[in-house]
Image (cartoon, grey):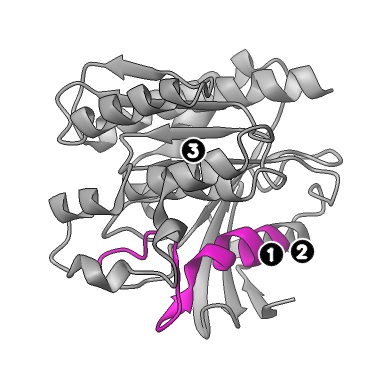
Amino acid sequence: MSINRLEISNPAYSPDNTKFVTVHSSNLQRRHDIVLYNSDAQGENLPVIILLHGVYGNAWVWMYLGGIHLAYEKVKAQLGGIDFVLAMPSDGGLYDGSAYLPLAKNANYDKWITEDVIAAVKQVQNSVSDKSRFYLSGLSMGGYGALRLGAKYPSLFSGISAHSSITKIDDMRHFVTTELTEYQCETEQESDIFYWLQQHKNQLPPIRFDCGVDDVLYQSNLDFAQKLKTLNIDAELASYSGEHSWDYWHQHVQTTFKFFANIERANN
């Protein structure tokens, strides 16, 4: 276990249905944060959606820039009685974004998500257990993280949904001034989404992804979709009007909730 200890917000001083958690992680060698929404949901073995943010972001941006809690409440009645806990972790705070990679000279941002965040949610949420299903989504750099981590660890996640995704590390150049050599891992394959998709082709959970047609990443998403077809992986790009913006993500994360609810329904 890489979690050393946790700090959890006092509900008397926190926004309704929300928890703020600080995790002391040996994977990061420092403290980082997770925001939980729908934390008051009752039940056993509730499913969890981990939402990964983009560059410049942190644990609070999904709620307080993207209004994800409002987006969730908009579609809650359409989920057919299925309740999710939403977990929104920091990416670990490296540069303008860690890309959720295992970067040996800095920290393991990969295991921060796949070990620490999952363990922390189980620890602080009585409604979440080892029997709960976890789902993974993200926007921009977080979309890259969702696709790569979901493909690398298919047994951990029951579904993947990505929005306006960076599909290769070279795409980071659109958003950061950090030299891309800083994102080199121990092996070249580590950061390659397609390497992990090929490695686990027969074990992948359901995948969906979307992008706005006016997004700077739209062509990369088209190329990614075409390459998926060559691998015979069942995941198609949904193209919508819109740009690389919170308005776009607020709207289309609602599709993610419905997608994951359909998977939950099929598995119950």
Picture quadrant of residue 219: top left
Viewer-nearest residue: 235 or 67: 235
Q: Quadrant for the C terminus, please.
A: top right
Q: CA distance from mark 2 to mark 3?
A: 22 Å
Q: Looking at the rendered structure, which numbered label has been put on residue 33?
A: none
Q: Are marks 3 and 1 in contact (CB under 8 Å)?
A: no
Q: Earlier in the sequence, mark 3 or mark 1?
A: 3
Q: Mark 2 — residue?
A: 123
Q: Which residue type carries mark 3?
A: His
Where are the magenta residues, as a range? 96-119
The vertical placement of 81 against 91, above or below, is above
Number of numbered markers = 3
Q: Return the x and y of residue 159 as percentages of the image width and height.
A: 62, 33
Picture quadrant of residue 43: top right
Q: Mark 3 — residue?
A: 69
Viewer-nearest residue: 43 or 228: 228
Viewer-nearest residue: 117 or 247: 117
Q: Which residue type carries mark 2?
A: Gln
SS at mark 2 in the image: helix
Kindly identify the residue that appears in the image at 38 percent across and 61 percent down.
58
Kindly identify the residue that appears in the image at 59 percent across and 79 percent down.
25
Q: Return the x and y of residue 37 as percentages of the image width and height.
A: 58, 46
Q: Mark 1 — residue?
A: 120
Q: Return the x and y of residue 99 as percentages of the image width and height.
A: 37, 59
Q: Earlier in the sequence, mark 2 or mark 3?
A: 3
**Relative to 42, is 156 on the left or the right?**
left
Q: Are marks 1 and 2 in contact (CB under 8 Å)?
A: yes
Kindly identify the residue that appears in the image at 20 percent across and 23 percent down.
242
Confirm whether the magenta stretch covers residue 10. Answer: no
Q: Which residue type carries mark 1?
A: Ala
Q: Nearer the viewer, mark 2 or mark 3?
A: 2
Residue 222 can be seen, yes or no = yes
